[in-house]
Amino acid sequence: MGEESPLLRSLGAAVEAAPEDIPLRLHLARLLLDGGRTSEAIAHLGVALHRDPGSAEARTLMAEAVAPAAPPAAADGGAVGGGAVGGREAGPASPGEPAERARTAQEPAGPPEFDWHSAERDIAGAVPPRFVAAEPEAEAEAPADGPPEDAWDVESVGGLRLADVGGMREVKERLEAAFLAPLRNPKLRRLFAKSLRGGLLLYGPPGCGKTFLARAVAGELGARFLSVSISDVLDMWIGASERNISEIFTSARRHAPCVLFFDELDALGGKRSHMRHSGMRNTVNQLLTELDGVAGAAANEGVFVLAATNHPWDVDNALLRPGRLDRMVLVALPDAPAREAILRYHLRDRPVAGIELGPLVRRTDGYSGADLAHLCETAAERALLDSVRSGEPRMILMRDLLDAAAEVRPSTEEWFTTARTVATFRESGGAYRELLDYLKRTKRL
């Protein structure tokens, strides 16, 4: 092949500069096709069809490019003029052949049908596919023999202990007397015929460390920890929520000793009399069944059930009956030692200077643990913004924390308003006696 013509070079450069110009690309393809450069023409036609699949001109040129070459003309011109079809003379129709066959043999052959599969193979390297099929997924391997894999995250709390919880001496004493001491002393438990059945309900204002206490209890027992929230249980399909609860207890029994912790129990086990949907009532019924032990009293051996709620008065009464969550412990606002420990924890990795925790602890009486964390975050923001404005980084100072304390207000006042009403007017059977005593002692009643 001779040297490429200047026209083709110019058209090729123009197409590279304007790849979206389909008419220009088709013109170049036509010239390449006329010049016998079929493979290059097919590449340009493939791009044109990729960008404009409905182009009639592109389809026609592609059909012409991929059509098989015509056979060479016979030396004897009479053979062609006699209408040879398919390499044999058509001739007149014999008496036994249908008239239709004879007529078909005499008609000239139409244009060959366009072979799209052949065209795709020709342009496979020049044009990327428009749609990529997903590779078939590998078949899952059959599970090895052994217990089924848990769908629930049963974790270890490591060396966490109640001593790691700052302050809250009364809460720790209540946990020790009501829950931990009988479990740590099996001989005394047998002597006093103390049953291991039943669970413990932690209640109090939000953000006061109920979940952290539950983890510390698991650490004291050397047990695994399985935390469950309403999102882990509820399902849109009928019967699926009940099955989830059953599987949760099965996982806890398999990993015994295990602390099974239900967070926000009022959402999962609310009063059935207030529920309009039968699905939620069935969920509470299943929870009651599992707490009782579907296979007898020993079914939940080694499973220690803890629950937490901000609104114990909204929990179904059946869940609080003996043998279930029959002990209640108030986790109130952090006392002074607890507030100091919380402040130290949230300031430990921040650049601080000249901090006096004593005045700050007194200034934050009535703050929850979450409020104290937010106070430290606000003080850090103030120091950061001041550093940005001045262009010189500085430490978090005492004035930042005091200004943050003036800005961040306690978030538990609404809870105490409801708690006062419950403790004063809805108290029955001494269930909220501890709450009533706390309100009196802290002058909130």
Image (spheres, helix red, strand yellow):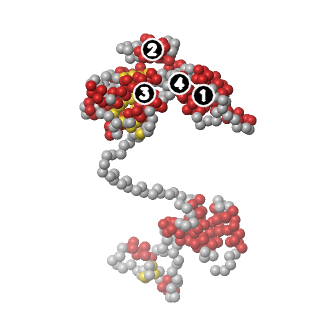
Instruction: Name the residue located 61 percent from the left edge and 35 percent from the top edge.
Output: 350
57 left or right of 113 in image: right
> Closer to us: mark 2 or mark 4?
4
Query: What is the spatial separation of the Cα atoms under label 4 and label 3, in whole angstroms?
Result: 23 Å
Q: Nearer the viewer, residue 182 or 133?
A: 182
Above or below for 38 versus 267: below
Instruction: Name the residue located 33 percent from the left edge and 77 percent from the top edge.
Output: 96
Which residue is disc 1 drawn over?
375
Q: Say which amino acid is labelled 4.
A: Pro
Q: Does the CB distance between marks 2 and 4 fall below 8 Å? A: no
Query: What is the spatial separation of the Cα atoms under label 3 and label 1, in whole angstroms?
Result: 25 Å
> Closer to us: mark 1 or mark 4?
4
Helix, strand, or loop for circle 1?
helix
- Disc with the residue nearer the chain's start (4 vs 3): 3
198 left or right of 22 in image: left
Residue 124 x %, y %: 53, 66
Q: Nearer the viewer, residue 407 or 397?
A: 397
Which residue is disc 2 drawn over?
437
Q: Characterize the local packing of mark 2: few (<14), some (14-19) or many (20 or more) Cα atoms within 10 angstroms.
A: few
Per the rendering, the mark at residue 308 is: 3
Q: Say which amino acid is labelled 2.
A: Asp
138 left or right of 388 in image: left
Q: Nearer the viewer, residue 228 or 13?
A: 228
Which residue is disc 4 drawn over?
337
